[in-house]
């Protein structure tokens, strides 16, 4: 197990280096003169030169990359063009709201996705099954930003029950997290249903029932445990979808997170901030995939890490 | 024929195909279907709710929403088809060669795919737009590029499986070259996953391209693009909710159509793909 962990971490290193290189290249491959592009159309020649110097754009590329990496290890991601603040600081203050939003959405996904899937699988072709599978199909096809707008229209503009935007107490969290979780709940529910249905047909379930195990025991102890591995995989993969959905959801609800920071900095062409936020999201994603991988072993002892 | 019969028996897939057909008709006959000019504005008529003359109401510049959504079908379908084509044209050959030759090439390509897949979902497209700048064509390119890694993965997986089959051995014994084997014998047997993936990617392409539009990073106004229309509607949501309802409905319906058809195609072409695609 430990050696597997070490090996997985070692494999993650080239991926992380590659991600860093792509993020590093964002500024360098800008069409035209990158320093000019970053400084803006109306910048003076003097300012453009300062930008070039500050970013080290006048140095050879491999030295630039080494300096970029060196800066990363010291937590230095450069300074924002818009605000002049250190990028690391800006990204960090936006990180907590995003973590709050995505983890609540992940919780909703696990709770409702698996619950609906189990009920559907144990009562296949019932009214509940048909209705929930129909809604999950709709949930998968709805653009997250439109769902957000429609929920906002209903619950804050029309009914006035919930705040339309911003971050504050629990009430502010409800609409964005439900919006973000909707498609994941839909996917996990469908997947749990089909996986569990397949497991319930296995012979060992028949055996368990024949032994006189209660239905709840057959489903929860015998079937669910075996169905859980593919479900955990899907939920793990959904985390990426949640991170990318957060970019849109945060924009809809003016949620002060990393996703909104990405969009704002792309619109403002604030390249150091784009680099910092994109790097942060990608590193989180790689790390989460690693955790999901390790979770398999905890759920299924048959998986041996060699 | 068996595939077609299986597909026709799949009621949801037939429904999906019908939805797509309606959108295609909208796109082709847009000038005949829309009774108004999608670009002609009249500030006197701005943000009017749905009426007989304007069935979907008017937007913030008094343009007919129905006409804009009908013409928007052209933009969205074009963006979807072109971005999927980019993913196909780049991803399929790379995946095929990587799987067929293996070795160092495969190792290199797979690490590259790992790196690209580390940018979840729409983020890779946003990175590309950050470099190229916003706009209709750049958004298409961005979405297309972010589809490439998925195609490489799926095609490589299928090629690895098929390259061990006996008919490949037979073709080689007959003196066929590598390229002939890949093109004639292997890729033709990978068609099922490629077709299914492409149909499902068309749905994702519409979602992502309109997402970029919503964020202001895709098609720019006055282009009647559904996502861009939604992005501008948010300001007026309190006074004129209809400007936010209809473009989103168009996106959701077209995505639903492609998703249903893709699911049906998967079950009809190769049920074993379930769970992989």
Image (cartoon, rainbow, N blue to C red):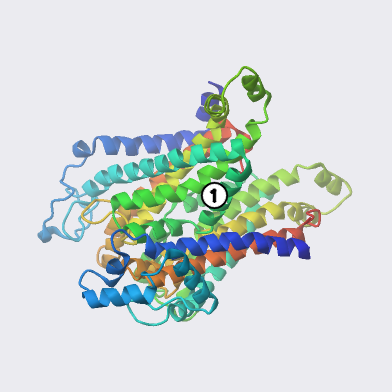
The residue under the point 27% across, 47% down is B72
Q: In the image, residue A144 lies at what x, y percent?
A: 43, 59
Left or right: where A4 falls relative to B147: right
Q: Is residue B277 above or below residue A87?
A: above
Count how many numbered circles sit on residues in the image: 1
Q: Is residue B270 above or below residue B240?
A: above
Q: In the image, residue B235 lies at what x, y percent?
A: 27, 67
Q: Residues within 10 Å of mark 1 (few under 14, many from 20)?
A: few
Q: Callout 1: helix, strand or loop? A: helix
Residue in front for this viewpoint, A213 or A68: A68
Q: In the image, residue B203 lies at what x, y percent?
A: 43, 45
Residue in front for this viewpoint, B142 or B211: B142
* Residue hosting label 1: A131
Left or right: where B164 falls relative to B146: right
Residue in front for this viewpoint, B115 or A110: B115
Left or right: where A39 falls relative to B127: left
Q: Is residue A120 visible?
A: no
Q: Is residue B107 visible?
A: yes
Q: Is residue A159 above or below residue B207?
A: below
The residue under the point 62% across, 17% down is B174
Residue in front for this viewpoint, B182 or A203: B182
The residue under the point 23% across, 56% down is B221
Quadrant where the N terminus of chain A sits is bottom right
Q: In the image, residue B61 lies at what x, y percent?
A: 16, 59
Q: Is residue B156 above or below residue A258?
A: above
Quadrant where the C terminus of chain A sits is bottom right
Chain ID of residue with mark 1 = A
The residue under the point 82% across, 42% down is A203
């Amino acid at each position: 197990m430990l050696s597997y962990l070490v090996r997985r971490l070692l494999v993650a290193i080239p991926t992380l280096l590659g991600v860093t290189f792509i993020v590093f290249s964002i500024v360098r491959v800008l069409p035209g003169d990158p320093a000019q592009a970053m400084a803006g159309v109306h910048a003076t020649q003097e300012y453009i030169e300062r930008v070039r110097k500050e970013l080290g754009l006048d140095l050879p590329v491999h030295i630039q990359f080494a300096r970029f990496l060196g800066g990363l290890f010291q937590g230095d991601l450069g300074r924002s063009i818009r605000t002049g603040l250190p990028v690391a600081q800006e990204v960090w203050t936006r990180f907590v709201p995003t973590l709050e939003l995505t983890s609540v959405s992940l919780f909703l996904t696990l709770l409702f996705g698996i619950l609906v899937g189990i009920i559907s699988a144990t009562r296949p072709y019932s009214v509940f099954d048909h209705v929930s599978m129909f809604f999950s199909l709709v949930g998968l096809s709805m653009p997250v930003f439109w769902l957000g707008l429609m929920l906002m229209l209903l619950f804050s503009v029309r009914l006035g029950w919930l705040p339309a935007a911003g971050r504050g107490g629990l009430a502010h969290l409800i609409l964005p997290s439900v919006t973000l979780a909707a498609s994941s709940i839909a996917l996990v529910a469908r997947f749990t249903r089909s996986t569990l249905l397949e497991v319930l047909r296995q012979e060992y379930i028949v055996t368990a029932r024949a032994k006189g195990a209660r239905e709840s025991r057959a489903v929860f102890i015998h079937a669910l445990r075996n169905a859980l591995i593919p479900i955990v995989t899907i939920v793990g993969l959904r985390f990426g979808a949640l991170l990318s959905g957060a970019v849109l959801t945060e924009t809809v609800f003016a949620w002060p997170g990393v996703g909104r920071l990405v969009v704002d900095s792309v619109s403002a062409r604030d390249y150091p901030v784009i680099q910092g936020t994109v790097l942060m999201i990608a590193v989180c994603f790689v790390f989460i995939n690693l955790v999901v991988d390790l979770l398999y072993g905890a759920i299924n002892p048959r998986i041996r890490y060699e | 024929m068996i595939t077609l019969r299986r597909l026709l028996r799949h009621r949801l897939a037939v429904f999906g195909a019908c939805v797509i057909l309606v959108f295609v008709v909208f796109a082709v006959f847009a000038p005949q279907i829309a009774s108004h000019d999608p670009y002609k504005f009249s500030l006197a008529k701005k943000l009017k709710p749905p009426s007989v003359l304007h069935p979907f109401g008017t937007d913030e510049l008094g343009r007919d929403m129905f006409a804009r959504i009908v013409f928007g079908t052209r933009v969205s379908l074009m963006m979807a088809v072109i971005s999927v084509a980019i993913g196909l044209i780049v991803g399929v050959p790379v995946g095929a060669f990587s799987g067929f030759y293996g070795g160092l090439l495969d190792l290199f390509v797979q690490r590259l795919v790992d790196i690209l897949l580390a940018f979840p979902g729409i983020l890779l497209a946003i990175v590309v737009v950050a470099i190229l700048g916003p706009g209709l064509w750049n958004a298409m390119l961005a979405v297309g590029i972010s589809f490439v890694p998925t195609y490489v993965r799926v095609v490589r997986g299928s090629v690895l499986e098929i390259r061990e089959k006996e008919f490949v051995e037979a073709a080689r014994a007959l003196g066929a070259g590598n390229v002939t084997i890949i093109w004639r014998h292997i890729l033709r047997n990978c068609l099922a996953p490629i077709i299914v993936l492409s149909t499902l990617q068309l749905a994702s392409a519409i979602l992502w391209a309109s997402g970029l539009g919503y964020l202001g990073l895709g098609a720019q106004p006055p282009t009647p693009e559904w996502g861009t229309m939604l992005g501008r509607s948010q300001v007026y949501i309190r006074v004129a909710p209809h400007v936010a309802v209809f473009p989103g409905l168009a996106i959701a319906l077209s995505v639903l159509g492609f998703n249903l058809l893709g699911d049906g195609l998967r079950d009809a072409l190769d049920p074993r793909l379930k769970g992989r695609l």
